[in-house]
Image (cartoon, helix red, strand yellow):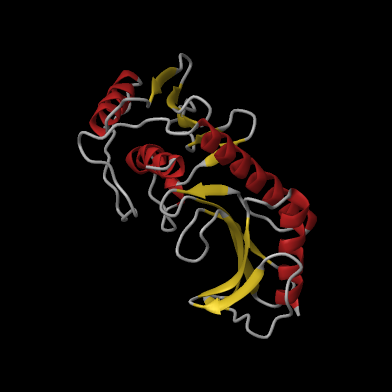
Amino acid sequence: MKMFQQFHLASQYLAMAGKSFLEHLEDDSHTNMGFSITEKSLWTWPLDNSGTQLGLNYTTFSLEWKTTTPQLLSLKGKTHDDVVAWLKNMAKASYFTKPYEYNLHYKLPYSMDETDTFEVSSDTEVKELIHLRTLAQNVLGAFLNEQNLKSEIRVWPHHFDTGAFGHLHDGSGKSMGLGLAIPDNLVNDFYFYISGYRGSTNLRTWAFEPLSYGKWINNGFKGAVLAASEATEEMGLEFFREALEAYKK
């Protein structure tokens, strides 16, 4: 199993911590995560009043139960049941009133059998995954700031994309969903994406001018995509700028 797939599966432990301990929100945002560039880690929202969080460290491939006395669990060689048992113990030790429960409410494209263990199959791939999460965080942050769009930048556990959503506030009623997605049937690479909406209606792109970087798609997914493995921060920014200008016209 590729490393990005293992990290996707491992991120579900964070999502289920949000589901176990936080108030459930209609958009499921209680299960999403933030990425820390400095710590090279995904983090849940604070899980209690004292700020306890669960993290997934990319560098060490470990979970961190962040309290006043942080506890670490290396995922290497661990089965799914090993991890869930550890998390249940962490919640008990932190005097959480609810138990930790692992109960996905969506389907993932891959899974682990009972005897499968997490392993670091490629250090090179791990470094690339850190680079891509950092690239996404920097590009989205710079673009949102530049365009005065208000949005959190979060990693969503179902599709494992780094995503943002912003309203244009120009009287058009338009909004933008944008981010960095993992490889799928649309693009066989990590890729930047942007899609426009008016209300809940996805805006068509067939008449838009070609982009300097990336391309428009109007079949199924309606928006623009740019393969990220060779993209620089400036290329990513220019991709989003040009796409936004097309949507504004």
The C terminus, quarter of image: bottom right
Res. 203 visible in picture: yes
Residue 34 location (% of width, % of height): 55, 41
Residue 66 location (% of width, % of height): 47, 23
Residue 246 location (% of width, % of height): 73, 75
Between 146 and 114, the residue placed more toward the observer is 114
What residue lies at 34% left-to-right and 53% top-to-bottom? 108
Looking at the image, which residue sits at the far top? 69
Asked whether, in this view, residue 11 is left or right of residue 80, the answer is: right
Looking at the image, which residue sits at the far left? 114
Above or below: residue 164 compared with residue 75: below
Above or below: residue 188 compared with residue 102: below
What residue lies at 42% left-to-right and 30% top-to-bottom? 120
Between 26 and 74, the residue placed more toward the observer is 74
Q: Quadrant of residue 217?
A: bottom right
What residue lies at 43% left-to-right and 48% top-to-bottom? 157
Q: How many marks?
A: 0
Asked whether, in this view, residue 194 is left or right of residue 33, the answer is: right
Above or below: residue 33 compared with residue 76: below
